[in-house]
Amino acid sequence: MKRLAKWRLISLFAVLALVLSGCGEPFLSTLKPAGEVADMQYDLMKLSTLIMVGVIVIVVIIFVLILVRFRRKDDKIPKQVEGSHKLEIIWTVVPILLLLILAVPTVSATFKLADVSAVDKKNSKAIVINVRSHLYWWDFEYPGQKIVTGQELVVPTNEKVYFNLKSLDVKHSFWIPAVGGKLDTNTENINKFWLEFDDKRANDAGNLFYGKCAELCGPSHALMDFKVKAISRDKFDSWVTAMQGVKDPIKAEGAVAAQGQEIFNKSCIGCHAVTPANNMPDSARIAPNLTNFGDRARIAGILDHDKKNLKKWISNPETYKPGNLMTGKYPKMTDEQLDALAEYLMGLKVQE
């Protein structure tokens, strides 16, 4: 009875794991592709799975047939087929054909996904974004538009967006599961690739996708998230224009926010920029750019975007991201100072 109960428990967990493996949000699941790259990769996944399942089914059928038909009934030795040229040709040719069926579309997709020649063309209108990874946050520079954002990537839909990937500390990996990827960010070289965000499927996902670090990089690796806002080209151009219009730090509105801006200028501005200019050297990119902080979807990439969580993050970032480089960089603040600073930061918006 104890053994039976154990098997029932194992069966329950197996079924539960199978059910949970099918769960996925449209903004995070690789099984719900939302762009051309993701579609290509999903098709390759389906093709390889079909081939593997087909091989398993055929082997099982042959195994059962042999088990039933040739089960031993007496001491007679059945006919031996060792050295059969026909069988050897079959089990040599069939795997080769299966490999070719899988290899041809895989190689074709690999070359297509690696084509970033549009970036090097003169007068190219392609959107190019320089991605820099840090412990444990992301920096996005738009060299053509001369702006920088932190932790939140904004892209136009229905066109190729090209990425130059680089790490400023240790190896990370840039991955937007629903849209495609992943590709490593290294310290010694720049990796390049492109993605395309489908407009309809972006709308279905609320125009927000989740990005992840897919390379173990430290104690807060699992918390190194970023958000992607995929919007139409018209809205993207409006966002760019609004960001380019910010030449000086946005002035605080209200007495409390003004007090928060004063605190920010004394304690935070040494690491965080509040203008989107991209003329900073890599060595000066110490912390995320906060120009449009009030319009973000998450705080530190992981917390709900509200004043309560913002104050928690400022007062004790180590609790939420162990090993982060913000811990201990500024003096302890009173509740009144935290309220004022949160009021100022939540008001940093370039668009209403």
Image (spheres, rainbow, N blue to C red):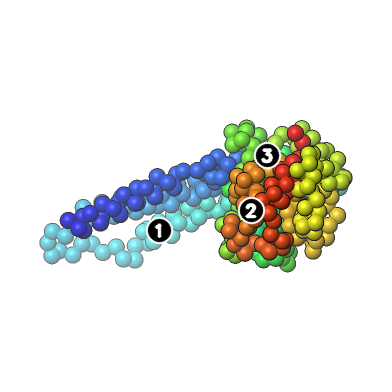
Query: SS of the residue at dot 3?
Result: strand
**Image spot of residue 23 (x, y percent):** 46, 43
* Most foreground residue, 33 or 209: 209
- Quadrant containing the N terminus in the rendered view: bottom left
What is the C-alpha distance between the residues marked 2 and 1?
A: 61 Å
The tag on residue 5 is: none
Q: Nearer the viewer, mark 3 or mark 2?
A: 2
The quarter holding residue 287 reads bottom right
Q: In x, y percent, where is residue 101?
A: 52, 50
Reading the image, the residue beneath label 1 is 91
The numbered mark, 2 or 1, whose residue comes first in the sequence reads: 1
Specify whether 198 is left or right of 273. Answer: left
Q: Residue at x 43, y 52 (%)?
A: 52
Relative depth, front residue between 221 and 252: 252
Q: Amino acid type of disc 3?
A: Ala
The single residue placed furthest to the left in the displayed view is: 74
Mark number, residue 313 = 2
Residue depicted at 86% across the width and 55% down the height? 279
The residue lying toward the viewer, choosing from 185 and 94, is: 185
Kind of residue at badge 2: Trp
Which quadrant holds the C terminus? top right
* Upstream in sequence: badge 3 or badge 1: 1
Q: Closer to the camera: disc 2 or disc 1?
A: 2
Q: Which of marks 3 and 2 is nearer the N terminus?
A: 3
Residue in view at x 46 percent, y 49 percent: 49
Task: Identify which residue is drawn at 21% across, 58% down.
Answer: 3
x and y percent of residue 99 in the render? Answer: 50, 55
Name the residue beneath numbered marker 3: 230
The reply to whether residue 28 is visible in this rendering is yes
Amino acid type indicated by mark 1: Trp
Per the image, label 2 sits on a secondary structure element best described as helix
